[in-house]
Image (cartoon, helix red, strand yellow):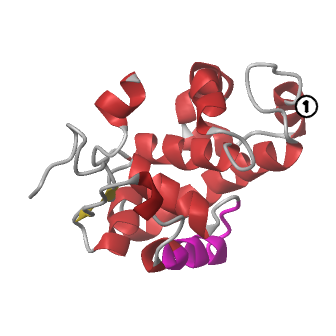
């Protein structure tokens, strides 16, 4: 799959991309990742290419429009959480200078390299994802439980959970 081969686990430092992945991971709650991947382009269109400034300004009319968009997950709580998360994201940027600076603190600025040999070894959460979840929630983010945060960390390369047998695993 191209997503795995080119993107998953690659360290991300671009705020827009980090916001995109945080929103997509939250949208996945209760669903399969492949469902969200198939809707990714639709999410980009529906949510103004994940422009947090624009999303933070969405009103009830925009929510109503999004609830009719068959290209995304039409769940009011997830849509409203995306808007609230955009506002919280902008506050974090203001406080830390960038979301990148803020989020990478949870791994001390460097990707954590795991050495898993089988998928069974990969945990659903870690102390870092639990700390991230707790702090994000305190800052007003929603759909950011410890499992979602760990998936986000994996997707954005804060942790390298490629199996040791995977061509993407780098033993550094």
Vertical relation: 52 (above or below) 85: above
Farthest-out residue, left: 172
Residue at 40 percent of width and 64 percent of height:
103
Residue at 28 percent of width and 49 percent of height:
11
Task: Evaluate whether residue 74 shows in this view.
Answer: yes
Closer-to-camera residue (75/97): 75
| Quarter of the figure with residue 36 | top right
Quadrant showing the N terminus: top left
> What secondary structure predominates along the stretch shown in magenta?
helix
Asked whether residue 137 is drawn in magenta, I would say yes
Task: Evaluate whether residue 93 shows in this view.
Answer: no
Q: Is residue 106 left or right of residue 143?
A: left
**Regarding mark 1 in the picture, which secondary structure is present there?**
helix
Residue 131: % across, % down? 50, 79
Residue 144: % across, % down? 63, 62
Residue at 20 percent of width and 37 percent of height:
167
Q: Which residue is mark 1?
A: 64
Q: Is residue 37 left or right of residue 164?
A: right
| Quarter of the figure with residue 41 | top right
Residue 8: % across, % down? 37, 40
Instruction: Count the labels in the image.
Output: 1
Q: Is residue 154 left or right of residue 71?
A: left
| Residue bounds of the magenta highlight | 130-142
Vertical relation: 51 (above or below) 97: above
Vertical relation: 167 (above or below) 26: above
């Amino acid at each position: 799959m191209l997503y795995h081969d080119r993107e998953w686990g690659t360290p991300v430092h671009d705020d827009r991309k980090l916001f995109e992945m945080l929103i997509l991971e939250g949208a996945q709650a209760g669903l399969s990742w492949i469902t969200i991947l198939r809707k990714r382009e639709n999410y980009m269109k529906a949510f103004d290419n994940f422009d947090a400034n624009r999303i933070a300004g969405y009103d009830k009319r925009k929510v109503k429009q999004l609830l009719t968009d068959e290209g995304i997950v039409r769940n009011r709580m997830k849509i409203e959480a995306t808007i609230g998360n955009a506002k919280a994201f902008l506050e974090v940027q203001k406080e830390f200078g960038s979301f990148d600076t803020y989020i990478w603190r949870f791994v001390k600025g460097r990707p954590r390299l795991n050495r898993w040999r089988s998928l069974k070894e990969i945990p659903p959460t870690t102390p870092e994802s639990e700390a991230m979840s707790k702090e994000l929630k305190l800052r007003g983010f929603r759909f950011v439980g410890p499992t979602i945060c760990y998936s986000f960390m994996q997707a954005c390369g804060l942790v390298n959970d490629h199996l040791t047998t995977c061509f993407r695993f780098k033993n550094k």
